[in-house]
Amino acid sequence: MSHSMGHSSLVEKLKQEINESYATITITELSRKVATNVHSMRKLFKQATGMTIPAYRQLIRMNKAKELLLQTKNDLLTVSDKCGYENKNSFSKAFKKQFGITPTAFAMQSLNNVENTNTLQK
């Protein structure tokens, strides 16, 4: 196996671990799971993706939050908890920073779009 292949499979393994445990996984836990020291792991991930591990994890968390908000049975507290936030205020700030809209406004906008689509189909 070539050296670069080893690096790309390590990065893919990191992405997989983050995708599966985005709410709770830490840098230390990641390094243990892929059997690589933290410094090397961070450097390889950044070189391969152009993103830091925390930035990638945040992106995954926010995309999951959007997905959960689109499911109308999820309230803000449930979504923030499932995405690994200690409280809904820090979740709301992070969501607004990422998407430029509050999670509540996003959910309302999405609900209105669904209702409008349903009305148009009748």
Image (cartoon, rainbow, N blue to C red):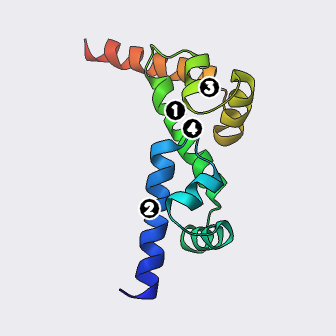
Residue tagged 4: 23
Q: CA distance from mark 1 to mark 2?
A: 24 Å
Q: Position of residue 25 (x, y in %)?
A: 58, 45
Report the mark closest to the observer, 4 or 1. 4
Residue tagged 1: 66
Residue tagged 2: 13
Q: Residues within 10 Å of mark 4 (few under 14, many from 20)?
A: some
Foreground residue, 52 or 1? 1
Q: Please report whichever mark, 3 or 4, sits nearer to the chain's N-terminal start.
A: 4
Q: CA distance from mark 3 to mark 4?
A: 17 Å
The secondary element bearing badge 2 is classed as: helix
Report the mark closest to the observer, 3 or 4. 4
- Residue drawn at (56%, 59%) of the image: 32
Amino acid type assigned to the residue bearing label 4 in the image = Ala
Mark 3 and mark 1 in contact? Answer it, CB < 8 Å.
Answer: no
Q: Position of residue 43 (x, y in %)?
A: 65, 73
Q: Residues within 10 Å of mark 1 (few under 14, many from 20)?
A: some
Foreground residue, 82 or 27? 27
Q: CA distance from mark 4 to mark 2?
A: 17 Å
Amino acid type assigned to the residue bearing label 1 in the image = Lys
Report the mark closest to the observer, 2 or 3. 2
Q: Please report whichever mark, 4 or 2, sits nearer to the chain's N-terminal start.
A: 2
Classify residue 101 by image quadrant.
top right
- Residue drawn at (67%, 26%) of the image: 102
Q: Please report whichever mark, 1 or 2, sits nearer to the chain's N-terminal start.
A: 2
The secondary element bearing badge 3 is classed as: helix
Q: CA distance from mark 4 to mark 1?
A: 14 Å
